[in-house]
Amino acid sequence: MIRDVRIQSVADLLPLLTEQEYRQDLDRNRSSYLYRGMPNVDYKMVTSLRRNCKHLQKDLELAILQNFAKYAIREDPNVSRNIWQCMITGQHNGLPTRLLDWSQSPLVGLHFAMTEENLENMEEHDAVVWRIDMQELYGILPERYQTAVNRLQSTIFNIKTMASITESLEQYDRDMKDQAMVIIEPPSTSDRIINQYSFFSIVPTAMSDIEGFLNQRTEHTVRYIIDRHLRWRVRDMLDQLNMSERIIYPGLGGLSKWIARHYYVK
């Protein structure tokens, strides 16, 4: 089930920022949680592929990936290595894919929740940071997926592991149905991926209601709902912590976004 936690003060953010379980075997604190920030609590989690192609997602997905690989190979010779490499590279460059972005950093999640295309809307609606548990989602995967990643002494999938299980989108959809999804860590091919501490969920075609899946199949999912009147305060706090567009999007584009917002007149 999904648990809602309401954030109405900066102090209320502390549990979100310190969710690490003590591991006696390591004598360290570790977290298996991932975060996804959204500027409007009413927004649904929808992949860019479903938003772009709607009911024809299944029919058009392979053509989208094949055309991307065909034209992108000049810039990235590895793009056609396997379907998962192609998908992640495409997602990173704005291609419609079935991937959904997550971060292991709650600060990154908060950044995206505290950011609007139109800053006039900052106090118009509550924002949200979703939290999911990688360990919990791993536990409901088909057995052969768990076995494959266990060989690496890990519960985190990568491109190589996924390619060893299946390079077929049809097979993946048959394996997952609408009952499970893989969390994959992308290769560190860019500063953006590194700085955002990126992970992706590979959403099966049959999973048209991601929130419904999380509500029915998980116990550790949380929605941190940030009060709309707190958003500017949290936004300013994140900037002081150096969590801004210039870190999230390294380069002149991110720098320009940060400067524009820094000098925005309310």
Image: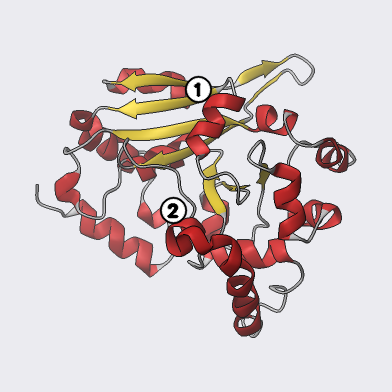
| Residue 32 horizontal/vertical position (percent) | 64, 29
User: Along the polypeptide, which appears first: circle 1 or circle 2?
Assistant: 1
Task: Say the numbered circle drawn on residue 18.
Answer: 1
> Dot 1 surroundings within 10 Å: few (below 14), some, or many (20 or more)?
few
Q: Is residue 32 above or below residue 148?
A: above
Residue position marked by numbered label 2 in the rendering:
248
Of 205 and 68, nearer the camera is: 205
Give, as a three-letter code, the residue at label 1: Thr
Q: Secondary structure at mark 2?
A: helix
| Residue placed most toward the observer, 218 or 107 | 218
- Where residue 257 appears, x then y in whole percent? 29, 60
Query: How many labels were placed on the picture?
Result: 2
**Secondary structure under the numbered disc 1 in the rendered image:** loop
Q: Amino acid at mark 2?
A: Ile
Residue drawn at (26%, 20%), measured in percent from left and top? 8
Position in image of residue 128 (x %, y %): 36, 34
Corner quadrant of residue 227: top left
Inspect this view and state whether residue 206 appears. yes
Residue located at (67% from left, 32% from top):
137
In three-dimensional space, the C-alpha distance between marks 1 and 2, rounded to whole angstroms, equals: 21 Å
Relative to residue 146, is residue 14 depicted above or below?
above
Q: Is residue 5 left or right of residue 50?
A: left
Asked if one can make out residue 242 in the rendered structure from this viewpoint, the answer is: no
Which circle marks residue 30 in the picture? Answer: none
Instruction: Answer left or right for 67 relative to 49.
Output: right
Asked which quadrant contains residue 256, the reply is bottom left
CB within 8 Å, label 1 to label 2: no
